[in-house]
Image (tube, rainbow, N blue to C red):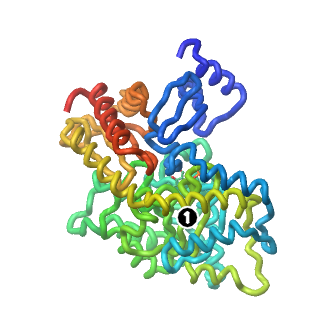
Amino acid sequence: MGSSLNAELLQRDLGALVHSLHNEAAHRAGNMWVRGEGCEIIDADGHRYIDAMSGLWNVTLGHGRRELADAASAQMMTLPYCSGYAGNANPQALALGERLASLCYPSINRFFLTSGGGESTDSTIKIARYFWKAQGKPGKYKTVSVMGGYHGVTLAAMCATGMPAYWPAFEPRMPGFSHIPNHDRYRYVVPAGADPETAAADELERAILAEGPDSVALFLAEPVMGGGSYVPPAGYFPRIREICNRYDVLFAADEVITGFGRTGRMFGLEHAGVEPDLVQFAKGITSGYVPLGGVGVSDRVAAAFDRAGDTWMHCYTYSGHPVSCAVALATLDVLEREQLVERAAHLGERMHAGLRRLLGAHPHVGDIRGLGLMATLELVENRATKRPFDAARKVGPQVLAALRERGVITRGRGDQVYLGPPFVIGEDMLDRMVGRVGEAVMSVLGPA
Ligand SMILES: Cc1ncc(COP(=O)(O)O)c(C=O)c1O
C-alpha cells in the first residue's frame, strides 16, 4: 500500500480501535472504506470493489438507498428514542411487529427486538429456558446446535456457535451447550444403512438421548449455514421438527443471514416446509443501515410471557428502537415493491450456474454449494479424495487476495470462498463478479 491514504489511515486506526476479529497484520493490509454506491464500495485511495458479500451478508438493498436514509431522518426528527421497557411503546416498533407477523411463519406472531444477531441468540436461549420454567420443567435448560454453525459471539452465543476457533481464548465455555455433526452433504459420512435424507438429523435424537430429554430446552440451527453455505438434504428439517416434537424440545431457526430473502424465499426454513418455534433474525431486516435484530416466538411460546404477575427479566436499552424500526419498515417496503426476494432466487440461479460453468470441472474445486444468493466454493488439494490443502499454503486467503486485486471484496474461511451479493446487483455486474472468481481461482490454482 506504500504511502497511500488507506495505509496512513489504517495505521492511525490501529492506535485508536480494537476491531472485530482483531488481527494486526490483516488490518494493516486492509481498506479504509469511505463510500458505498449501489453494489460497490470505495476505499480511501479511490479503489472501487464489488461488494460481493453485501458487507457481512446484510446490505441486501445495496448502498445509498435514499428511502432508508429518509426513513431514519424523519424518525430522528420525530422521536429519536424512547424506552421499550414494559409500559412504553412506539408506533414504529408496533408496525414492525405487525408487519413481521404477516410475513413470518403462520404460528409466529410476536417479536422481541434486539440490536443484532448475537443478542438475538442470547434472547432465544433465554426465551427457551424461561418457557420451560413456565411449563413447570425447570430442568430443561440445555441448547443443542450444529458444528459449523455460527450464532454470534456473546458468551452464550459463542457457546452455541459450532466453530471451535472461537472458543479457546475465552474458555471455559458455559455448561449446557452441545453440538451435533454438520449435515455437510460434501463431507458428512452417512452411517451404513441410514437414509441420507435424514441421517444427519437423527444425530439430534442421539444427542437429546445422551443429554437426557428432560434437560434439553432448545435446538438452534441455521436453515442454510452462513459459514460454508451448507444446505441440508430436503428431509433434514422435517425430521428435526419430528424429533423436537417427540422430545419436547423447542426448535429455533437462526435466520440472521437467511431471513428477508437471501435464499430466494422470505425465510430460509420455508424451503423445508416446516415451522420453527422461534425464529431469530438481524442483518437484512434493515439492509445493514442501522442495527436491528429480533426473535419471533410461536403462539404457544408467547403465552408464557403473559402470565399474570410475572415479569420477564430480560431487556435491552435499544429493544424496539424507533429509528431502527422505521428503517426496517422502509427496507421491507423496498423488498416488496421491487420484488427482491424473487430477484434473489433468479439471480441466485444465475450465480450458481455461472460458478458451475466456470469452475465445476476444476481439479481443485471440490464443491460449489449454497442456495439463492448464498454460495461457497470449497477448494481442495485432491478432488477425488476431497483431501484439503495443507493449511500453511493459505490457498483460500490467496484466492481472496487475487479477487481483491480484481476489484471484488468478499470473505471466506480456510479454503472456502463465500459469495453473497446484494439483491439489487445487475446481471452484468453479477456475471463480472463470477468471471473474476473464476480468474482468481485459476490464477492461484491453474486452469480448469
Ligand atoms: C447466522 C448468524 N447468527 C448470528 C450472527 C451474529 O450476529 P451479530 O454479529 O449481529 O451479533 C451472525 C453473524 O454473522 C450470523 O450469521
324 lies above or below 298: above
| Residue under numbered circle 1 | 280
Q: Indicate left or right for 400 with 252 as reference.
A: left
Image coords of residue 135 (percent x, y):
62, 84
Three-letter code, disc 1: Gln
State whether residue 392 appears in this view: no
Image coords of residue 225 (percent x, y):
42, 55
Image coords of residue 104 (percent x, y):
51, 72
Q: Indicate left or right for 336 with 430 as reference.
A: right
Image coords of residue 353 (percent x, y):
25, 48
Residue 314 lies in quadrant: bottom right
> Badge 1: how crowded within 10 Å, few (<14), some, or many (20+)?
many
In the foreground, 411 or 434 = 434
Q: Secondary structure at mark 1?
A: strand
Residue behind label 1 places its C-beta within 8 angstroms of ligand 1: yes
x 29%, y 47%: residue: 368
